[in-house]
Amino acid sequence: MDRLREMVRLAESIGLVVLVDPDEFTLKTLVLPCRDQETGIRVDFIFSWSNYENQALDRSRSLELDGVPVKFASLEDLVIHKIIAGRLRDLEALRLLLYPRMTPFPQSFTQAPASRRINLLSRRYRRRRQ
């Protein structure tokens, strides 16, 4: 991460507030979370090294926002990233994304090990698709 300081300066120069200590968080997770000061929109810069992540970047879609091209992950890759992360907040984001009208997860689900939560999510998804 030779250019991390440069990335932080760039983010701040366009009005983003860095939400973490880059030396601690970003070097460990390869994610630089920021928030736009004006709109409050969360922006995560994700640094990739694996073949899968590079392929996901190739599959991303570029949209122009105020004349600036911005890449967005495909829905499939976003789902994979959230499942791999396995944090409750990521699984809840998946629930909201895939099942916006579904009721919140019960406490028994949120306290289950990550592998069990993923299995439960898979079964729930398959039932809804039938």
Image (cartoon, rainbow, N blue to C red):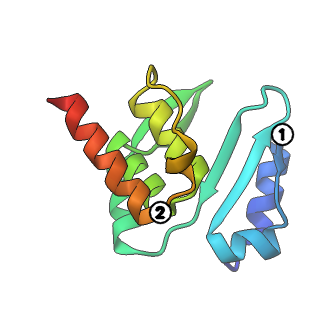
Given contact means CB atoms under 8 Å apart, are the residues at marks 1 and 2 in contact?
no
Residue at image point 77% right, 50% down: 11
Res. 38 image quadrant: top right
Vertical side of 65 occupied by 124: above or below: below
In this view, the residue in front, 16 or 93, is: 93
Q: Say which amino acid is labelled 2.
A: Ala
Q: Say which amino acid is labelled 1.
A: Gly
In this view, the residue in front, 65 or 67, is: 65
Q: Earlier in the sequence, mark 1 or mark 2?
A: 1
Q: Which numbered mark, 1 or 2, is in the foreground of this view?
A: 2
Q: Is residue 57 left or right of residue 40?
A: left
Vertical side of 98 occupied by 109: above or below: below
Q: Position of residue 117 (x, y in %)?
A: 43, 55
Q: Secondary structure at mark 2?
A: helix
Vertical side of 109 occupied by 23: above or below: below
**Visible residue check, residue 56:** yes
Q: Position of residue 124 (x, y in %)?
A: 30, 39
Res. 26 image quadrant: bottom right
Distance, label 1 to label 2, CA atoms, is 36 Å
Q: Which residue is mark 1?
A: 15
Q: Residue placed farthest to the bottom in the image? A: 2
Q: How many numbered marks does the figure carry?
A: 2
Res. 98 image quadrant: top left
Which quadrant would the N terminus be assigned to in this image?
bottom right
Q: Position of residue 68 (x, y in %)?
A: 59, 34
Q: Is residue 64 left or right of residue 50?
A: right
Q: Position of residue 24 (x, y in %)?
A: 80, 75
Q: Which residue is mark 2?
A: 114
